[in-house]
């Protein structure tokens, strides 16, 4: 079926391209790509990517066509809704016909297939040579052009195929392109059959030998697939049977295991009862030994006594010996009796025999001791003395150790079972230790003692841990590890492992290191299976813990425990844990996850999870925390490259993420086709993502260079060419005889994407532009000066619109792609000058080896090109902004100042104006020394120029200097030059000085503020006699803006009294020149600065100002503001309007604090009011 679908699709593609249904073909291309059928899209991709058929400039022009307005779209939507309702009704009617025709169509299809089979078996064998000859002589054009009836039938068949194949968008486009036919009505003709295109395909198969062979191959393939399906089904049945057998065996094993466990528990109970009985017998034996000991002591005393005769002593001894002998002879009977009388069921015969053997051995020992006593009384006395002392000392020492251990408060509370276990540890407690009492079962006893010790530890540690100081709990780790490693009960091990991970509530770095070392040591000892089943579940439980220190412990364990688990667990469970930790809210946890993911990658068994890990790496790369990004760059990124060895894929995804981050941001302007519509307003997150991705690109540059050198297809590379690319190598590459994809990636893909990104960055994004510049400088440094000269520089020259770029060192196959970077419209040319020219100046020509070329290029750009005809105003602002960006690099300042002096001494006025603008832009990037030595002399020279426009341009630059520097010497020079400008007396000079100094008011010194205020006072005291109302308004607006800006600063009382208030009064004398908004603001400032004397001032000036009624209604007792502030206003003498009444210091401070915020807020409305007061001609100095 796949071959049939491909053939039908190829037929449709050929038909659409032959009939020039381009829109339908284009829509079919996209639907095939969405359907994953890339093999059928090759011809369509080649057709639509051909620049000769679809020129890029024409496509961009079509993209700029405005779409329909929302109202028309709404009307079309309503019309389509009505049409859709009608179509649905017709569709329901057609469904009945379709259901009726399906049976007939199926029958006809079956008949066609049978006929084809007969035809394949009969006709093709005899007529194959003739058909092959006809096939060679036959082509689509041999049958002539399509007739109208044929085209109508084929159109309907293609429409039917598109609908059946699910390409509905392509079908809709086909409806729109076929305008001369109603595709819903298929006239009666022999070609009208159900599923027509498929039927045509079968008919074609019956007419060509190759098609018949293809059909036969398809049928054979179907048969083989059916056989394979049958074989697989049989295998499946066999596997299911095996599964059932295995399940039965497992159930049998489970039952046998349960029975064995039950039997084992019963035997353990029997052993315990045997142990109890043996203990009872041991106590009896100890009593006998005690009696023997007392007998020995009695014999010794009788021999040394003076009051007892020898005969009496012999009698006593004989009686004592007889008594002991009787007790010893009765011991076996007691042992047998106690062995028979037990409270359990059956007892292990081996355990019973072992206990009986040990008892008999002890009995023999006692009998030997008695015989020794009878044989030689002297030896018995000495031996009895020695044994008694040794026994007494050993007993006392053992009891002392036990009592000390039990009485230690840190060991918690012990149950009787614990005490019994402790006594079992040293069987010598309470009895005489003698080497002759050792039995062949000593190893079993030792193992039993070890298990008892482990049991004590397991029971005691959970009780001890809470009472140990946090800083000393790590000292319990050896005991805890021993208990976890050796305890036989899995539940107790899980409990102890949980205690290990929770040993400290919020462990610091050192404590986490200690706990982690303990876990690694434990994993090394217990093996893979127990690490997976006991340690990893604890990690999973802690992954969502409240405290970040505990989650940090989990992150650290993932990288260090991975070595001790099976390989298939590393890239499944552990990788899932790390992936969840990447979403953690704590920065340190995400940073630890990145670090441990880097440790984890070399341990993966294969690279099946590469794309998942790569996605996690890019997620960490765009993390909002700089610590996480730094760890990802320095550790995870190199580990991923080394593990996956897919540098080319990382680079493609990196450039894609970088561009998409900018493309998802809204444009600066919604006006389609404008320059601002190409620029993007970057959000904080998008700006951060682009920045870190550019850093990542910088980190990958050494790897790119290394791989480019390693994959060089030209074997004749000398040792001097191992790190850089020589001219001879570039010449060989330019011949284009061998492919070099990693080398071409830099100048074909990387540079193109960086240029596309730069064309979306507004002027204020200097930081990102600086990142790109540093990357370009690193490329030129690492790839060499020849690469910079012959490849990198031509690419950027083409991108800024240079037609004379030398591309001879680039293969001719990539020339179209390089030339496609050239701007082809006026807006694209402006965009290239604004966004790409800064990179060319600072990142390409700014390399140390290109300083001379940079100087010549900049001189030609700023000086020589301006002397040509019609070049004076072309992209002037964009070029100046590019030079401004170049000024951000201090190493170019001397060169720029040299070119600026050439522009200053030139006779062209526009060059001098541009020099003033450049001086203004360079000021923020220099220090006071450079400003005093270079900028101020240049501005003073421009300020003395005879051309007024040059002079006014220098005034703006002086304002920028005053804004950035507060050095007294610089301020003195500025004031002297401002006086010179004001002495000119021209209207334009006054406006330029006032507005230049307004910008500097918030940042400059108090001296400059007082100077500006005094100059405004003098100028307002001598109003202009001009009858031009526009000029009076312009000057008044400038004064008002300055007053409002000064009012937002801390002015001295003297300046307020002597200059500020009188200046406001002078401005209010000419109400016709004042903007209403400025007028209201000045009245408020006057009221606040003069206190309660404002009403008196308004009455005194009412007749002249003509505002008595309005001011009284606004600020009087009956006015709105008068009501609110009546309690705050103090009455002063009308004859002294500028003198405030006496107030306490606290009152003055309160008033100052109360009005300061309002003054600052008013100062921020200066630009708004300026835009209201300006006319379009006032935005730049007038040219006379």
Image (cartoon, rainbow, N blue to C red):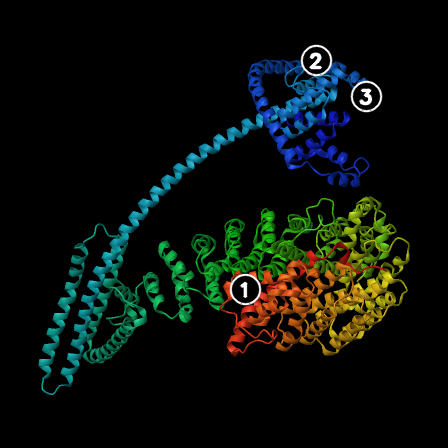
Question: From this viewpoint, which residue is outermost toward the bottom?
Answer: 306
Counting other residues with Cα less than 10 Å from the Cα at mark 2, is it few (<14), some (14-19), or many (20 or more)? few
Q: Which circle's residue, 1 or 3, is located before the other in the chain?
A: 3
Whether residue 1175 sits left or right of residue 734 in the image: it is left
Quarter of the view holding residue 432: bottom left
**Above/below status of 470 relative to 535:** below
**x%, y% of residue 950?**
83, 65
Q: Secondary structure at mark 1?
A: loop
* Mark 3 lies on residue: 141
Residue at left offset 22%, top offset 60%: 276
Secondary structure, mark 2, is helix
Q: Residues within 10 Å of mark 1 (few under 14, many from 20)?
A: some
Vertical arrangement, residue 960 with respect to residue 567, above or below: below
Q: Which mark is residue 1018?
A: none
Distance from the alpha carbon under mark 2 to that under mark 3 = 29 Å
Nearer to the camera, 388 or 515: 515
Q: Nearer the viewer, mark 2 or mark 1?
A: 1
The foreground one among 571 and 288 is 571
The image position of residue 57, as x and y in percent, is: 79, 41
* Residue tagged 2: 122
What is the CA distance from the residue labelled 2 to the residue labelled 1? 117 Å
- Residue denoted by label 1: 1116
Percent position of residue 356, x then y: 23, 59
Q: Quadrant of residue 417?
A: bottom left
Q: Is residue 488 left or right of residue 701?
A: left
User: Residue 1021's image quarter?
Assistant: bottom right
Q: Which is more N-terminal, label 3 or label 2?
A: 2
Residue 932's place in the image compared with 71, above or below, is below
């Amino acid at each position: 079926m796949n071959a049939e679908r491909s053939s039908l699709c190829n037929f449709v593609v050929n038909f659409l391209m032959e009939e020039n249904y381009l829109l339908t073909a284009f829509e079919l291309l996209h639907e095939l790509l969405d359907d994953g059928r890339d093999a059928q899209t090759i011809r369509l991709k080649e057709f639509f990517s051909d620049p000769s058929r679809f020129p890029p400039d024409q496509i961009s022009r079509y993209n700029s066509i405005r779409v329909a307005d929302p109202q028309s779209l709404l009307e079309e939507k309503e019309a389509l809704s009505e049409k859709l309702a009608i179509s649905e009704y017709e569709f329901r009617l057609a469904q009945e016909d379709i259901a009726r025709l399906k049976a007939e169509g199926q029958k006809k299809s079956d008949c066609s297939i049978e006929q084809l089979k007969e035809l394949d078996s009969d006709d093709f064998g005899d007529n194959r040579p003739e058909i092959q000859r006809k096939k060679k002589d036959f082509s689509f054009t041999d049958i002539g052009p399509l007739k109208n009836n044929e085209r109508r039938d084929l159109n309907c068949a293609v429409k039917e195929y598109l609908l059946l194949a699910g390409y509905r968008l392509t079908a809709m486009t086909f409806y729109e392109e076929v305008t001369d036919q109603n595709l819903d009505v298929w006239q009666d003709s022999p070609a009208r059959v159900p599923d027509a295109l498929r039927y045509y395909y079968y008919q074609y198969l019956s007419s060509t030998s190759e098609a018949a062979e293809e059909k036969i191959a398809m049928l054979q393939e179907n048969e083989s697939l059916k056989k394979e399906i049958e074989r697989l089904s049989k295998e499946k049945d066999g596997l299911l049977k095996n599964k059932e057998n295995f399940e039965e065996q497992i159930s049998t094993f489970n039952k046998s295991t349960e029975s064995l466990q039950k039997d084992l528990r019963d035997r353990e109970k029997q052993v315990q009862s045997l142990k109890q009985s043996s203990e009872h017998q041991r106590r009896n034996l100890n009593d006998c030994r005690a009696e023997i000991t007392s007998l020995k002591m009695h014999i010794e005393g009788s021999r040394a006594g003076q009051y007892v005769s020898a005969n009496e002593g012999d009698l006593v001894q004989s009686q004592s010996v007889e008594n002991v002998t009787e007790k010893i002879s009765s011991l076996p009977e007691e042992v047998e009796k106690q062995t028979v009388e037990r409270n359990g069921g059956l007892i292990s015969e081996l355990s019973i025999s072992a206990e009986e053997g040990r008892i008999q051995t002890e009995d023999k020992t006692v009998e030997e001791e008695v015989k020794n006593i009878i044989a030689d009384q002297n030896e018995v006395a000495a031996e009895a003395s020695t044994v008694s002392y040794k026994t007494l000392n050993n007993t006392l020492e053992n009891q002392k150790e036990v009592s000390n251990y039990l009485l230690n408060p840190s060991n918690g509370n012990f149950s009787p079972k614990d005490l019994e276990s402790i006594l079992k540890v040293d069987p010598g407690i309470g009895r005489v230790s003698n080497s002759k009492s050792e039995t062949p079962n000593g190893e079993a006893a030792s193992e039993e003692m070890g298990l008892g010790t482990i049991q004590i530890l397991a029971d005691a540690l959970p009780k001890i841990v809470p009472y140990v100081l946090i800083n000393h709990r790590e000292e319990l780790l050896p005991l805890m590890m021993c208990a976890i490693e050796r305890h036989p009960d899995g539940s107790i091990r899980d409990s102890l492992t949980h205690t290990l991970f929770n040993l400290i509530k919020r462990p610091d770095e050192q404590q986490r290191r200690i706990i982690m070392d303990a876990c690694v040591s434990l994993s090394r000892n217990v093996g893979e299976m127990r690490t997976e089943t006991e340690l990893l579940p604890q990690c999973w439980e802690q992954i969502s813990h409240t405290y970040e220190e505990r989650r940090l412990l989990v992150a650290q364990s993932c990288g260090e425990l991975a070595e001790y688990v099976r390989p298939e667990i590393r890239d499944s469970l552990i990788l899932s844990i790390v992936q969840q930790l990447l979403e953690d809210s704590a920065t340190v946890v995400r940073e630890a996850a990145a670090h441990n993911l880097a440790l984890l990658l070399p341990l993966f068994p294969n690279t099946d999870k590469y794309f998942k890990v790569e996605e996690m790496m890019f997620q960490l790369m765009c993390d909002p925390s700089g610590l996480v990004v730094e760890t990802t760059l320095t550790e995870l990124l190199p580990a991923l490259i080394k593990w996956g060895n897919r540098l080319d894929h990382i680079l493609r995804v990196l450039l894609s993420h970088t561009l998409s981050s900018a493309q998802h941001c809204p444009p600066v302007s919604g006006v389609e086709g404008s320059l601002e519509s190409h620029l993007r307003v970057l959000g904080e997150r998008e700006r951060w993502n682009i920045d870190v991705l550019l850093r990542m690109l910088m980190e990958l540059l050494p790897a790119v260079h290394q791989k480019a050198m390693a994959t060089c297809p030209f074997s004749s590379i000398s040792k001097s060419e191992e790190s850089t690319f020589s001219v001879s190598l570039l010449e060989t590459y330019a011949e284009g005889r061998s492919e070099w994809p990693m080398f071409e990636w830099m100048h074909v893909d990387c540079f193109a994407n960086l240029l596309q990104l730069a064309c979306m960055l507004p002027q204020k994004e200097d930081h990102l532009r600086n990142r790109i510049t540093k990357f370009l400088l690193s490329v030129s440094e690492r790839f060499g000066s020849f690469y910079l000269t012959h490849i990198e520089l031509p690419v950027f020259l083409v991108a800024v619109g240079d037609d004379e770029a030398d591309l001879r060192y680039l293969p001719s196959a990539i020339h179209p792609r390089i030339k496609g970077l050239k701007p082809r419209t006026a807006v694209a040319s402006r965009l290239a000058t604004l966004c790409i020219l800064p990179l060319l100046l600072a990142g390409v020509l700014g390399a140390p080896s290109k300083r001379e070329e940079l100087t010549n290029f900049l001189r030609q750009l700023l000086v020589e090109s301006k002397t040509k005809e019609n070049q004076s105003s072309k992209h002037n602002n964009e070029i100046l902004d590019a030079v401004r960006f170049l000024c951000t690099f201090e190493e170019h300042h001397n060169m720029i100042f040299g070119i600026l002096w050439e522009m200053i001494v030139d006779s062209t006025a526009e060059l001098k104006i541009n020099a003033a603008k450049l001086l203004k832009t360079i000021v923020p990037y220099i220090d006071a020394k450079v400003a005093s030595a270079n900028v101020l002399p240049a501005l003073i020279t421009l300020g003395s120029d005879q051309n007024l426009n040059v002079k006014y341009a220098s005034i703006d630059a002086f304002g920028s200097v005053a804004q950035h520097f507060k050095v007294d010497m610089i301020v003195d020079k500025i004031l002297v030059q401002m006086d010179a400008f004001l002495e000119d007396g021209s209207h334009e000079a006054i406006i330029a000085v006032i507005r230049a100094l307004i910008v500097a008011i918030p940042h400059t010194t108090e001296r400059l503020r007082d100077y500006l205020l005094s100059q405004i006072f003098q100028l307002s005291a001598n109003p202009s006699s001009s009858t031009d109302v526009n000029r009076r308004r312009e000057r008044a607006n400038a004064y008002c803006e300055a007053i409002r800006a000064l009012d937002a600063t801390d002015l001295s009382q003297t300046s307020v009294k002597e200059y500020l208030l009188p200046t406001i009064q002078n401005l209010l004398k000419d109400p016709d020149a004042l903007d209403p908004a400025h007028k209201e603001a000045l009245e408020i400032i006057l009221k606040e600065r003069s206190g309660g004397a404002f009403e008196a001032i308004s009455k005194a000036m009412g007749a002249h100002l003509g505002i008595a009624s309005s001011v009284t209604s606004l600020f009087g007792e009956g006015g709105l503001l008068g009501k609110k502030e009546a309690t705050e206003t103090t009455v002063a003498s009308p004859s002294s309007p500028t003198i405030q009444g006496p107030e306490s210091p606290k009152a003055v401070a309160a008033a100052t604090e109360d009005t300061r915020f309002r003054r600052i807020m008013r100062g921020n409305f200066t630009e708004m009011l300026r835009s209201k007061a300006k006319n379009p001609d006032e935005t730049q100095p007038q040219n006379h």
